[in-house]
C-alpha cells in the first residue's frame, strides 16, 4: 500500500513538473502566437502594433503581455473593416494587457482580459458619419475566430487626444490634454453589424480631459472647454470654462452675408448635465435628462439690419424647432444662473444698438418632445442694466400654434434706452421716467394679440442728424405730437392698451413678441391719428 501511494505521489510530482516546464517554456509561446493569429484573422491586418520592448508572463490569474515604446496604427484605407471597427492611432510609453483568460483564448471565441493599462499615450481618434458606421454581414471576414472582446478594466493615464474627421484626415476637429480614462466591464461584440459605439456594452466610463479645443476646418465657429468630467455610472457631465467663438471677426461675418443672420459669441463658467439614461444618447435614440444647469453664460449676438431677410424661408417658432430635432428630448429642467445677453444690432452707424439683459436667471421646464407637454419658461433679471424685469412663456408642444406670455418691466429712466434706440433710429431719449409696463398676450403661428398697461411721465426726446447733432425744429414738433405722460382713467390708473401684430413668415419668434410690444408702446405714447400714420399701412 505504501509503495502504491509512493508511486502515485512520484507520478503527480512528475506531472506537475512537466506542467511547470510546459508552462514556462512552451505555453507562453503558444498563447502569444494564438493571440496574434486570432487578432490578425479577425481584423484582417486593420490594426498593427509595434514596440521597442516586450515581456510576457503566465500566472494563476492569466497570461500577461507588457510593451514599452508602443506605436499602434490602423489601416484607414480599409473602409470595409474601418466602418465597423474604430480607426485608432496612438503612441504610448507603456501598454500592459494583463490577466488574459488562457482557456477562452485557446478553446473559445472570446478574448477576455482583466486589465489594460496605457500610460501617457498620444492618441488620434477618427469621427465618422452614421452612414459609414454600418455595413452588411456580407462585407465581414469569412473567418471570424474572435466574437467578443471583454475587458475588466481599461485605464488610460495622462494622455493627449486629437480628433480627426473621417472624411478628411487633415481636418483636425479638436485636441485635448491630460486625458484620464477608466472603463469597467467593457464588452465588444465583434460579430455585430453595427459600429462598436452602438454595439458595445459597459458598466462604467469615467473621463477627465483638459484644454479641449475644437476648430473644424469647414465650420464657422471654434469651441473650447477648460475642463471636462464625465461619469457614466452617476450619469453626470461637468464642464468648466466653455466658449464658442466665430472663426473670424463677428461684425464682418454678420455684415458680409447674402441674408441677415446672427453671429454668436458664447462663454459659460460651468455646465452640469444630469442624465436619466446616457445609453439612449449613446445609441442616438433620445436625450433623457433630469437637469441642465448653466452658470454665468455670456452671450453676445451680432446682427446687421441693413442686410435683407430671406423671404423664401419660413422661420419656426421656438418650440416648433424642438419638434424638428432629429432626437426626441425628455429633459426635466434647464436652469440659467446669472446670465448676460448683449444683442448688438448694426446699421450704417459707427456704434451698434445694444439690447442688454443682465443678472439673468431662468427656469425652463419640462422639455418633452416625446409626450409633447407644455414648456413653462420663467425669466427674470435686469433690463438695459437699469430695471428689473420678469417674463413667463407657456409653449405647448402638442399645439405649437397656441402659446402665451406675460411679463413686467419696473421703473427706469427713458435715457437708459439710448444704447438700443439712438444708433438705430436717430431718436435720442432726453427726459422722463418709464415707471412700469405690464403686458400679456397670446400667440399663434403668425399672429400676436395682447394687452398692456403703461405708466410713464415727463417723456421728451430729440431727433438727430448723421453727425449726431440735434435737429431742433423737428424735435420740438415731435415733442408736441407725443404724450408726455400716459393716459389714465377716472381713477388715475393707466388705460389698458390692446395691441395686435402679425409677423411675416420669414421673421422669427422674437419678432412676433417684440412687434406686439412695440405696437402697444406706440399706442401709449402717440395720439391715435399719429399712430395710424406711423404704425399702420
Image (cartoon, rainbow, N blue to C red):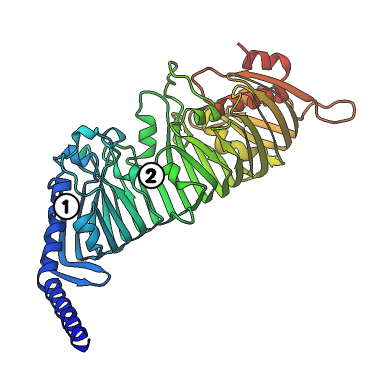
Q: Earlier in the sequence, mark 1 or mark 2?
A: 1
Q: Which residue is mark 1?
A: 39
* 229, 255: nearer the viewer: 229
Determine which of the numbered discs, if any, sits on residue 245 in the image.
Answer: 2
| Residue at 69%, 26% in the rendered image | 441
The answer to whether residue 343 is seen in the rendering is: yes
Residue lying at the far right of the rendered structure: 491
Would residue 425 be found to the left or right of residue 123 on screen? right
* 400, 523: nearer the viewer: 400
| Residue at 51%, 24% in the rendered image | 316
Labels in figure, total: 2
* 484, 480: nearer the viewer: 484
Would residue 452 be found to the left or right of residue 305 on screen? right
Percent across and percent down for residue 383 are: 62, 41
Task: Identify the element where label 1 is drawn.
Answer: helix
Q: Residues within 10 Å of mark 2 (few under 14, many from 20)?
A: some
Q: Quadrant of residue 130?
A: top left
Would residue 39 be found to the left or right of residue 398 on screen? left
| Residue at 23%, 39% in the rendered image | 83
Percent across and percent down for residue 281 are: 43, 42
| Residue at 18%, 37% in the rendered image | 80
Task: Identify the element where label 2 is drawn.
Answer: strand
Q: Which quarter of the image is occupied by the N terminus? A: bottom left
Using the image, determine if residue 281 lies above or below residue 177. Answer: above
Percent across and percent down for residue 116 are: 27, 63
Would residue 383 be found to the left or right of residue 88 on screen? right
Percent across and percent down for residue 453 are: 76, 29
Q: Are marks 1 and 2 in contact (CB under 8 Å)?
A: no
Q: CA distance from mark 1 to mark 2?
A: 44 Å
Q: Which quarter of the image is occupied by the C terminus? A: top right
Between label 1 and label 2, give the one nearer the viewer: 1
Amino acid at each position: 500500500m505504501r509503495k502504491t501511494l509512493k508511486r502515485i505521489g512520484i507520478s503527480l510530482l512528475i506531472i506537475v513538473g512537466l506542467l511547470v516546464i510546459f508552462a514556462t517554456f512552451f505555453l507562453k509561446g503558444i498563447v502569444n502566437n494564438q493571440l496574434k493569429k486570432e487578432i490578425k484573422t479577425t481584423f484582417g491586418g486593420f490594426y498593427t502594433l509595434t514596440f521597442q520592448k516586450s515581456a510576457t508572463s503566465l500566472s494563476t490569474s492569466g497570461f500577461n503581455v507588457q510593451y514599452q515604446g508602443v506605436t499602434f496604427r490602423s489601416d484607414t484605407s480599409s473602409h470595409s473593416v474601418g466602418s465597423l471597427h474604430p480607426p485608432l492611432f496612438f503612441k504610448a510609453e507603456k501598454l500592459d494587457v494583463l490577466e488574459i483568460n488562457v482557456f477562452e483564448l485557446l478553446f473559445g471565441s472570446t478574448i477576455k482580459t482583466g486589465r489594460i493599462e496605457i500610460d501617457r499615450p498620444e492618441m488620434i481618434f477618427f469621427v465618422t458619419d452614421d452612414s459609414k458606421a454600418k455595413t452588411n454581414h456580407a462585407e465581414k471576414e469569412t473567418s471570424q475566430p474572435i466574437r467578443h472582446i471583454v475587458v475588466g478594466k481599461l485605464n488610460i493615464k495622462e494622455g493627449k487626444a486629437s480628433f480627426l474627421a473621417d472624411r478628411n484626415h487633415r481636418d483636425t476637429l479638436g485636441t485635448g490634454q491630460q486625458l484620464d480614462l477608466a472603463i469597467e466591464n467593457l464588452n465588444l461584440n465583434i460579430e455585430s453589424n453595427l459600429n462598436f459605439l452602438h454595439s458595445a456594452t459597459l458598466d462604467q466610463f469615467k473621463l477627465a480631459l483638459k484644454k479641449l479645443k475644437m476648430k473644424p476646418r469647414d465650420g464657422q465657429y471654434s469651441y473650447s472647454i477648460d475642463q471636462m468630467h464625465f461619469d457614466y455610472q452617476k450619469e453626470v457631465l461637468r464642464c468648466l470654462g466653455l466658449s464658442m467663438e466665430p472663426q473670424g471677426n463677428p461684425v464682418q461675418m454678420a455684415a458680409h452675408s447674402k441674408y441677415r443672420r446672427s453671429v454668436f459669441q458664447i462663454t459659460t463658467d460651468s455646465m452640469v448635465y444630469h442624465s436619466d439614461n446616457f445609453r439612449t444618447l449613446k445609441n442616438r435614440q433620445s436625450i433623457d435628462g433630469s437637469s441642465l444647469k448653466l452658470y454665468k453664460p455670456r452671450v453676445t449676438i451680432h446682427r446687421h439690419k441693413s442686410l435683407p431677410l430671406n423671404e423664401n424661408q419660413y422661420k419656426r417658432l421656438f418650440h416648433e424647432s424642438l419638434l424638428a430635432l432629429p432626437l426626441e428630448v425628455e429633459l426635466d429642467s434647464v436652469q440659467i444662473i446669472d446670465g448676460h445677453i448683449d444683442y448688438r444690432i448694426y446699421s450704417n452707424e459707427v456704434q451698434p444698438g445694444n439690447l442688454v439683459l443682465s443678472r439673468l436667471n431662468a427656469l425652463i421646464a419640462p422639455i418633452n418632445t416625446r409626450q409633447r407637454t407644455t414648456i413653462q419658461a420663467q425669466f427674470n433679471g435686469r433690463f438695459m442694466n437699469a430695471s428689473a424685469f420678469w417674463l413667463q412663456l407657456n409653449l405647448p408642444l402638442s399645439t405649437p400654434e397656441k402659446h402665451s406670455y406675460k411679463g413686467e418691466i419696473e421703473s427706469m429712466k427713458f435715457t437708459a434706452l439710448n444704447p438700443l434706440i439712438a444708433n438705430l433710429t436717430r431718436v435720442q431719449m432726453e427726459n422722463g421716467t418709464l415707471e412700469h409696463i405690464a403686458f400679456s398676450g397670446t400667440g399663434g403661428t403668425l399672429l400676436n394679440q395682447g394687452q398692456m398697461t403703461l405708466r410713464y411721465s415727463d417723456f421728451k426726446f430729440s431727433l438727430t442728424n448723421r453727425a449726431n447733432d440735434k435737429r431742433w425744429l423737428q424735435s420740438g414738433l415731435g415733442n408736441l405730437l407725443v404724450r408726455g405722460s400716459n393716459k389714465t382713467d377716472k381713477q388715475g390708473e393707466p388705460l389698458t392698451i390692446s395691441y395686435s401684430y402679425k409677423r411675416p413668415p420669414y421673421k422669427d419668434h422674437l419678432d412676433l413678441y417684440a412687434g406686439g410690444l412695440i405696437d402697444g408702446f406706440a399706442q401709449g405714447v402717440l395720439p391715435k391719428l399719429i399712430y395710424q400714420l406711423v404704425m399702420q399701412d
